[in-house]
Amino acid sequence: MKKLSPRFALAAILIVAALLRGWSLDDGGVLVPYYFAGVRSMLQGWHNFFFNAFDPAGFVSLDKPPVAFWLQTASAKLFGFGRAAVLLPQVIEGVAAVALVYWLVRRRFGVAPGLLAALFLALTPVSVAVDRSNNTESCLVLVLLLATWALCRAVETGRLLPLLLAAALIGIGFNVKMLVAFGVVPAFALVYLIGTPLPVWRRLGRLVAAGIVLAPVALSWSLAYELTPPEGRPFVDSSPSNSMLELVVGHNFVQRFVRRAGDRIVPAAAATPPADQAQAVQAGRDYVPAGPLRLASPPLAAQIFWLLPLVLIGGIAAWWRSAGEPRLQLVLWGLWVLAYGVVFSAAAGLFHSYYLVVMAPGLCAIAGIGAVALWELYRGARRAALLLPAAILATGLWQAYVVQFFLAGSVEIGHSWLVPGLLGLAVAAALALVLLCRGGAALALPTAAAALAAGLLLPVVWSVGTSLAAFHAGFPAARPPFETRVALGGRQRWSQLAGAIDGDPKLIGFLEQSRGDAPYLLAAVNARQAAPIIIATGAPVMALGGFSGRDPILSTDDFARLVAENQVRFALLGDGSRGIRRVFGEDGQKALTDWIRENGREIDPALWRGLAAPEDPGPADGRSSRPAENVGIQLFDLRPASPGS
């Protein structure tokens, strides 16, 4: 029976992880419509599939590499295109990551640290949020953990093949989220240099060999894309020069760190941030300006850092107690967290809170290892025994600091009792363990377990709140339950920046009945307008300026030629409220939009507009997946001599 208990505990943790990630995906999973439309387009042929096309005609690509979307497309092919089918791969990847963290920690530190690390990852709020979305980070985390396994085998055995496998897996990670995957490379290289039982010159030579494997695997798809003639592939979205390599360096690297005022290729994620943290959260965005203390701020700490004092104090205790290969694994996890922490603290350009999920495996591994190390020191050393009560007290103080921020206007309950209750539990548990360290061994373990359960209460609350949230379209972020109407309305308005999943059925019906034999159903300024129509119909829709509406895909002459050739008949201009127009405005396509207005005939909105909303929608429950800002939008017929419309 004892042999089965760790398996039973792991199974229970995996069930919890699966429930949090998979609960009511159709009703509560978060979809970025831009990516969702891309999956529908990739289902329509191998050309679209390989080139990661956003639209069925392969006019423009998605602005990310393809591996995660290939998996989503495969799931949609197997189960039928729909929300749950596209979200399912991320749920599986998230649960697999929990199991893999257990295995990686257990093999060097034992069952208890492995189970705790897996439990912490299963309950990490931002991990739950990301694994319930169609973003690519879930796939990236799993691939990096597989690379970690291969690296550990390479260090232990001294064999070359596992090291090359680790390099290849990081290369695959590059084809999931580009340069973000390289955040683990410094940690991997250092750990291999320190820990491999080979002469130094052989270690260095093998690292060079790993680099030789990494580079071609990482760049294989980008180079294939780059070497394909432009007329034989989609335009590279978010790349002014139609270059996949420029996308790697520009939009997906430099723009993450530097955002210039008036930059003409700033997409939705870089909308002007609110002036302060409280305003940001009420506006629906968990945003904090870049800086050395960015990750310690409550809006981001609530996503992933609830157990930060346990990570820090427990990590020190684990370092003290370990040696050899276990200590080397601590170095790996610690450098993993440090590297991404530095990058995300400095990212002053395009930044979302869900990026932090790549730090979760390292944080949870250290927390699990550290918690057991603190317990062992508590039971075996006099002075060091105080580290466990200190960690419990520090964690309680930290969590009170984080949650107090949200009590200032983001949640409706707990204003009078939550912080005192947290502090009271932490003080009581710490004091009890201090008193029990000289005796009372029978009560010490239940007391420590109760303190751990109390420390997990808020991560559980945030994770459950995330699972029960009813958002359909937007950007993933962990959120508490019982949010105020102001906070809910802010999240609804922020989610609208991503666009809608469900297109206007009256507009779609009008286009399908009126386009005649034109291959393109519609030309829209940006992918935000095009995505819901592609999702609903699977028909070609031209996003003239790509995701942000600012890519120089077509000149005026090119577009006029397509109109003359009857390739496209209708064009949709305008994009919602003033705030949305600042990000997805028409300035980047002014020559084209001027031509459309001069040469087309505006169609009476009564003939095609079925959805309308005020320019500044009030607080909502977050459930709507349709456009909430159908104002300032105009539909033009580019064949004005034709009868009918």
Image (cartoon, rainbow, N blue to C red):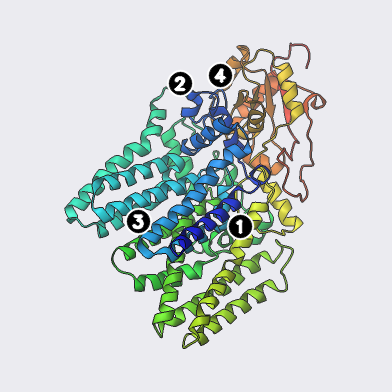
Comes first in the chain, label 4 or label 3: 3
Q: Nearer the viewer, residue 356 or 97?
A: 97
Instruction: Tell me the element at label 1.
Output: helix
Q: Nearer the viewer, residue 251 or 142?
A: 142
Q: Nearer the viewer, residue 424 or 19?
A: 19
Which mark, residue 558?
4
Dot 1 corresponds to which residue?
A: 463
Which mark, residue 129?
none
How many labels, in total? 4
Foreground disc of the pair 2, 4: 2
Mark 3 and 1 residues: CB-CB less than 8 Å, in contact? no
Question: Gap in Å between the C-alphas at discs 3 and 1?
Answer: 29 Å
Comes first in the chain, label 1 or label 2: 2
- Residue found at the very far front of the displayed protein: 1
Dot 2 corresponds to which residue?
A: 232
Instruction: Tell me the element at label 2.
Output: helix
Give the residue type at disc 3: Ala
Residue at left offset 66%, top offset 59%: 480
Residue at left offset 35%, top offset 73%: 321
Dot 3 corresponds to which residue?
A: 187
Question: Gap in Å between the C-alphas at discs 3 and 2?
Answer: 40 Å
Comes first in the chain, label 2 or label 4: 2
